[in-house]
Amino acid sequence: VSDVHERLRRLLFLVPYAAKRPGISVTELAQALGLEERELLRDLDLLTMVGRPPFQPDDYIDIYVEDGRVYVDLDQRLSAPPRLTAAEAAALSAATHLLRSSAAEALESVLAKLEKVLPAGARPQYRQMGRTIDASVEAPKDVGPLSRAIAECREVTFDYFSHGRGATEGRTVRPLELLSHRGQWYLHAYCCSRQDERLFRLDRMQKLTLTTRRFDSPTGSRAGKVPDPAREPGEVRVKFSAAAAPYLRERFGDAARAIDGGGVEVTVSGDSERWLTQWVLSFGGEAEVAEPAWAREAVARAAAALLEPSS
Amino acid sequence: MERTERLLDLLALLLDAREPIPWAELREAFPEDYGNCSDEAAERKFERDKAELLELGIPVAYVQGDDERKDGYVVEREAYYLPEVGLTPEELAVVYAAGSAALASGAFPGSRDLAHALRKIGFHGGQEFLSPRVRMELDTVQRGDELAGRLETLRDALAGRKWVQLAYYSPRSERTTERRVDPYGLAMRRGIWSLVGYCHLRLDIRSFQVHRIRDLKVNPAKPRSPDFEVPPGFRLQEHVASYPWEHRIHEPIEVQLSLRRDLAPLAAQIFPSARVERGPNAPEVYVRATYLDGLLRYALSLGPACVVTGPPAAVLRWKGMASLVLAAHGGKSAVRGGS
């Protein structure tokens, strides 16, 4: 994609977008377009020179900045953006497919509507590109409704099973962000009963309901952070054989330190004994916990349990 | 005049016109660009501009005149303007969630196109796509900055059907091989992007993990003419491994596993493509594996509630792995490369 192409399609969106929002601030407009402010100002400079022959005063696009706000007085018929290109529609379709496991019905309907607004000439290329990209993630069905609640700033309620308490209790939260990490989905939300931001696992939620109560779009909330035992500085030292070493280097980079015999070792968190034992076992004998002793014992117990005569 | 400016001027002129604009008039309207050169040079320049507008999805067409109209160029407003897409709030939420997750992952083929598309579909509804509210960490591997760029390069090669030259690293052999590949598709499973295509070194369809590509070049010759055709029967899904046991290492074998206690109700979720039968006590799962060790390691990680029950060779190997782990943690080390 050439720079001219990229800039043109941005400008063809910028004019109608700004015209629809008289007085939008330079900051907001730049953010909506994914631009730095100075880039936006350069775009606006260019647009003031655009018009149609014979270039009488009223033939130019009239777009200007006043007190940090953008106004469009003459759009020269750029009143809506052009239709989606084949490449844009294909990218949108490929991305939407990511959530097909949680929103199969919505996906079907979205794709049908998308194809309808494509120019007829773009359809063959759109279909061809559609066949070439196939990305999917396993996502639980609550991802759909939670995304909507986040977009519309609506409080939700659900029953939540807490391992710490060993019990299920009702929660009312303001959903802020969904995160997935290593196949596990989390909701980062402001919990109304705890009056604090918390992380909730989607697989421990039941009876999710969207309420009609709206909240103000949050500003300054902390970014949600998922626990990652393999990435957090930890106290459990695990050694790997030479055969497993290349895979560990791929995943840990320089944090995988070389040891004698061609293997590597890494240090991971011991917060979750369950995670640790599963992880070590998944290397089928190519991994060994070096220390501490409790972690070695935990892995030994798990391996012994596997070898017991099955019940 | 700058090209971007000229193209916008041209579009403004065509969008405003009530009648087709003959070529002669276009030349007069843009004397500096189409006027002051030979007929041939002017036409070439205009054709390039027209192609650029078409690529942006702008329906520039030439219409033959009749008694009442002259021959000339038009942009039909109906066909130009993006209409309401008409997505319901639920549908828009799904599209925004998936789109923002794809962008936030930091590496998605066609991310610029995707960002534009997301802005456009929210245009009429006033429901705006601003910052990502869904994040998917797709990093089961330590990734360099190259991944995002490689995916874009491969997407362009796929769209243009151009062959690529790869330096491909295999952690199994710890070697890098050079190969030419006709790219057929890109797939992502469990956070890993794979390129599927015809490998001229192996003379067969192969799949390559994109993060293991060390160097990537696209055939620079004739960018607008395709190098190959994708075979009509090709289906991308059939060539990507979703699970470790689906890597094609050996001939397929059927492995039987028994899922007990808390794993029993999860059989279909844990092994989605496997055959599940009701056993006397617990569900028996039959998994087709082309990489036995991959399956056995996965089974080990599920803990004692997952028991490998057949065939005997698989059971033996599974127990052997567990014994190795036990020996390594029961005092004496059984791990090569350990102390």
Image (spheres, coloured by chain):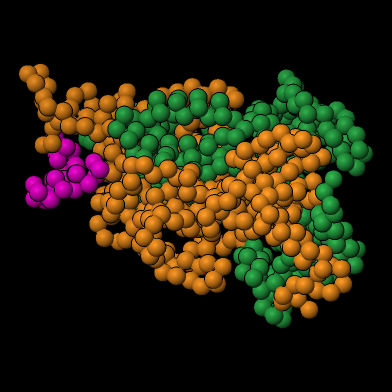
Chain colours: A green, B orange
Q: Residue at x 44, y 56 (%)?
A: B206
| Residue B18 pos. (x, y %) | 22, 23
| Residue A310 pos. (x, y %) | 82, 49
Residue A254 visible here: no
Q: Residue at x 12, y 51 (%)?
A: B41
* Residue B39 magenta: yes
Q: Residue at x 29, y 32 (%)?
A: A121
Instruction: Locate residue B34: give its quadrant.
Output: top left
Q: Is residue B319 above or below residue B69?
A: below
| Residue B32 pos. (x, y %) | 18, 48
Q: Which residues are magenta?
A: B25-51
Left or right of A83? Residue A143 is: right
Dominant secondary structure (helix, strand or loop) of the stretch shown in magenta: helix
Instruction: Locate residue B233: give its quadrant.
Output: top left
| Residue A44 pos. (x, y %) | 43, 43
Q: Is residue A249 above or below residue B9?
A: below
Left or right of A203? Residue B138 is: left
Nearest the camera: B117 or A46? B117
Left or right of A198? Residue B1 is: left
Q: Is residue B119 above or below residue B148?
A: above
Nearest the camera: B40 or B168? B168
Q: Residue at x 73, y 36 (%)?
A: B279
List the single residue furthest toward the bottom. Answer: A260
Q: How many marks?
A: 0
* Residue A59 magenta: no
